[in-house]
Amino acid sequence: MNSDHLSADISEVLLDEDSIHARLAEVAAEVDRDYAGRDLLLVGVLKGAVVVMADFIRHLNSHVTMDWMAISSYGSGTKSSGVVRILKDVDIDLTDKDVLIVEDILDTGLTLSWLMENLRSRGPASVEVFTFLRKPEAVQVELEPKYVGFDIPNEFVVGYGLDYAEQYRNMRQVGVLRPSVYGR
Ligand code: IMP
């Protein structure tokens, strides 16, 4: 049973608001530099990337376009399986665009590997990844995100867009969810 106050279900705050914003500003400066003069399309993965996207685009100084995909990665509880289905596709044509996928967290990387392959088949100029968080297991997949916000330990985290059972997305920090909340 979760409690009324979000923070009561968190055993440790990993990232506070100030560190998140400072890092987003750094990544945005890199993206501004790397994509100068290019046709950059940011593709956010719903719903986890909503919060990072909203803050990230406001740190960018270049012209960019933004679109969204919703995919469902079948898995049980806190683990994903790599079996992916598109629930909502992008509206914008990807041909000759420089696509930067904005993702909340890279864990096993199964979801993102699938997504990159899918988008690459549509004739874009390039497809790269900005993942806000990366867990240690992610090193096992052959997927090198161009930008990583933070490397975090192998714990189940929530907040800043990340959910457990669709809750905690509105927490301003990233924190470790108490295992008692998800019954461990
Ligand atoms: P992957 O396919 O294992 O890389 O899983 C990526 C997806 O699993 C993310 O987009 C999240 O939706 C979810 N996920 C993985 N780890 C966490 C976590 O610690 N907290 C919340 N969601 C997570």
Image: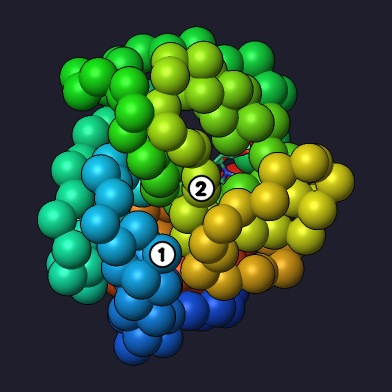
Asked which quadrant contains residue 160, the reply is bottom left
- Mark 1 Cα-neighbour bin, 10 Å: few <14, some 14–19, many ≥20: few
Mark 1 secondary-structure assignment = helix
Is 135 placed left or right of 87 in the picture? right
Using the rendered image of the protein, determine whether residue 43 is visible from the camera's viewpoint.
Answer: no
Residue at image position (75%, 50%) is 138
Mark 2 secondary-structure assignment = strand
Colour pattern of the rendering: rainbow
Decide which of tag 1 and tag 2 comes sooner along the chain.
Answer: 1
Residue 100 at x, y = what percent? 40, 45
Residue 106 in the image: above or below residue 75? below
Asked which quadrant contains residue 29, the reply is bottom left
Residue at image position (65%, 15%) is 83
Amino acid bearing label 1: Asp
Q: In the image as oriented, which residue stretches furthest toward the front?
A: 37
Callout in the foreground (1, 2):
1
Residue 134 in the image: above or below residue 74? below
Asked which quadrant contains residue 84, the reply is top right
Along the line of sight, the residue nearer the viewer: 76 or 143: 143
Using the rendered image of the protein, determine whether residue 142 is visible from the camera's viewpoint.
Answer: yes
Label disc, if present, on residue 129 of the rendered structure: 2
Along the line of sight, the residue nearer the viewer: 113 or 31: 31
Is 147 placed left or right of 161 in the picture? right
Q: Are marks 1 and 2 in contact (CB under 8 Å)?
A: no
Amino acid bearing label 2: Val
Residue at image position (17%, 43%) is 65
Is 155 placed left or right of 123 in the picture? right
Disc 1: which residue: 34
Residue 70 at x, y = what percent? 36, 24
